[in-house]
């Protein structure tokens, strides 16, 4: 079977890119090991995704945003960064922007479901579910993909959207920095007594971080980042002990807190490919850049990259230029690298600083928060990166 483009992986970035490319009248094949039932109704994984204004615009253009239950979309109107037990915070407010909110918080499963629904019945997109890519080859005339069933499909180009430990990236011999933080992220949903007032908190305690993110109603998403050797202890806590522990660590800001449902844990890695393209091959989403979640850039970066890639391919088609050539894809690589590298390395430096117990690090932490609060150009730069309002 012959396609124009084969996308390996069906995460929300890969699906969104497929939708964008389908508007260019290209024949797309998506290959993923998940079942159609799971893609249609993804299981709850505990993750909430912060969506910037740019991402909302892109998802709206693709038709995904309109399919997300409006009552499940929470607004983030303020954000506070806390250092240890200090009451002082780096404070961001939507009132310092021209927008009514800093961003939106949406369950990951709803974003995935909407991204799949918009491509589900398109004639020029074929989704091969419960299928793995065994291997692929690329030459001057095209690409050949061998599936685990033994079947082969070919295309003009392959797009890898198969995660931060991408097997496709490795097969292409593209080097990547993979940073293992030695930490585990634990996420869960909690109900609380007092209103959150649409405020997101990032609390850098010593030895761990605690994020409390506002969900619809009197609910929040709690995100704990802790050394992996201590994660099991938290996962095995009784709900009663866990509730009290979070309530205490959050200084009772939200009153009584009660965990709702399951706690989920994930090992914490970050990754950045040395380059995002080759002849007839390109990386998107976490396969290109897998971010530490502290600045909530992961999905937004991936979506922005796929949006840029789709526009570059559109321009090439308009010029009757081979959209799969290395020269065309070089533009995507250069644009996306300029965006991702400062954010990736800046975030990792921030994380290392705020996870350090050294006296000098503690001093720098306090200075950084005050400098960010009181020096407007820096504060505005941070806000623009976090919200992507422009």
Image (cartoon, rainbow, N blue to C red):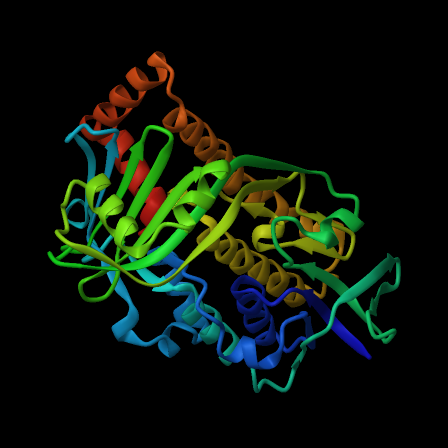
Horizontal side of 241 relative to 33 (left or right) equals left
Give the image location of residue 385, x and y in percent: 36, 43
Residue at the image position 33 percent from the left and 13 percent from the top: 359
Give the image location of residue 271, x and y in percent: 59, 41
Circle count: 0
- Is residue 51 in view? no
Residue at the image position 77 percent from the left and 57 percent from the top: 280
Residue at the image position 60 percent from the left and 75 percent from the top: 22
Q: Quadrant of the N terminus?
A: bottom right
Q: Is residue 185 above or below residue 1?
A: above
Residue situated in front as seen by the camera: 211 or 54: 211
Horizontal side of 136 relative to 185 (left or right) equals right
Horizontal side of 117 relative to 367 (left or right) equals right
Quadrant of the rendered structure where residue 275 is? top right
Residue situated in front as seen by the camera: 271 or 125: 271
Residue at the image position 86 percent from the left and 76 percent from the top: 151
- Is residue 199 in view? yes
Name the residue at the top extreme: 360
Quadrant of the rendered structure where residue 250 is? top left
Give the image location of residue 48, x and y in percent: 37, 59
Give the image location of residue 198, x and y in percent: 18, 56
Residue situated in front as seen by the camera: 215 or 280: 215
């Amino acid at each position: 079977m012959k396609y124009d483009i084969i996308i390996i992986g069906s995460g929300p970035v890969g699906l969104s890119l497929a939708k964008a490319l389908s508007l260019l009248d290209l024949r797309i094949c998506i290959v993923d090991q998940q079942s159609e039932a799971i893609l249609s109704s993804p299981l709850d994984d505990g993750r909430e995704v912060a969506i910037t204004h740019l991402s909302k615009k892109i998802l709206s253009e693709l038709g995904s945003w309109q399919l997300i239950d409006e009552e499940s979309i929470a607004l983030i109107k303020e954000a506070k960064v806390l250092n240890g037990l200090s009451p002082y915070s780096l404070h961001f407010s939507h009132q310092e922007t021209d927008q009514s909110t800093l961003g939106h918080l949406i369950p990951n499963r709803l974003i995935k479901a909407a991204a799949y629904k918009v491509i589900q019945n398109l004639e020029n997109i074929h989704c091969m579910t419960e299928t793995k890519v065994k291997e692929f080859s690329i030459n001057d005339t095209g690409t050949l993909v061998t599936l685990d069933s033994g079947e082969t499909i070919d295309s003009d180009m392959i797009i890898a959207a198969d995660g931060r430990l991408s097997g496709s990236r490795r097969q292409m011999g593209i080097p990547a920095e993979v940073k293992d933080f030695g930490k585990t992220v634990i996420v869960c949903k909690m109900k609380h007594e007092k209103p959150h007032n649409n405020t997101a908190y990032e609390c850098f305690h010593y030895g761990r971080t605690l994020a409390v993110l506002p969900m619809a109603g009197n609910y929040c998403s709690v995100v704990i980042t802790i050394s992996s050797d201590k994660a099991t202890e938290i996962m095995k806590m009784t709900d009663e002990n866990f509730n009290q522990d979070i309530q205490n660590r959050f200084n009772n800001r939200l009153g009584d807190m009660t965990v709702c449902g399951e706690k989920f844990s994930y090992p914490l890695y970050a990754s950045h490919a040395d380059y995002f393209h080759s002849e007839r091959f390109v990386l998107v989403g976490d396969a290109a850049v897998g971010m530490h979640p502290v600045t909530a850039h992961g999905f937004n970066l991936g979506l922005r990259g796929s949006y840029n890639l789709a526009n570059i391919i559109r321009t090439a088609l308009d010029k009757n230029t081979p959209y799969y050539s290395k020269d065309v894809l070089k533009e995507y690589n250069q644009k996306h690298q300029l965006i991702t590298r400062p954010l990736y390395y800046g975030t990792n430096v921030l994380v290392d600083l705020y996870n350090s117990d050294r006296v000098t690090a503690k001093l720098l932490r306090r200075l950084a928060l005050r400098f960010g609060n009181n020096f407007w150009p820096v504060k505005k730069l941070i806000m623009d990166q976090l919200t992507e309002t422009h």
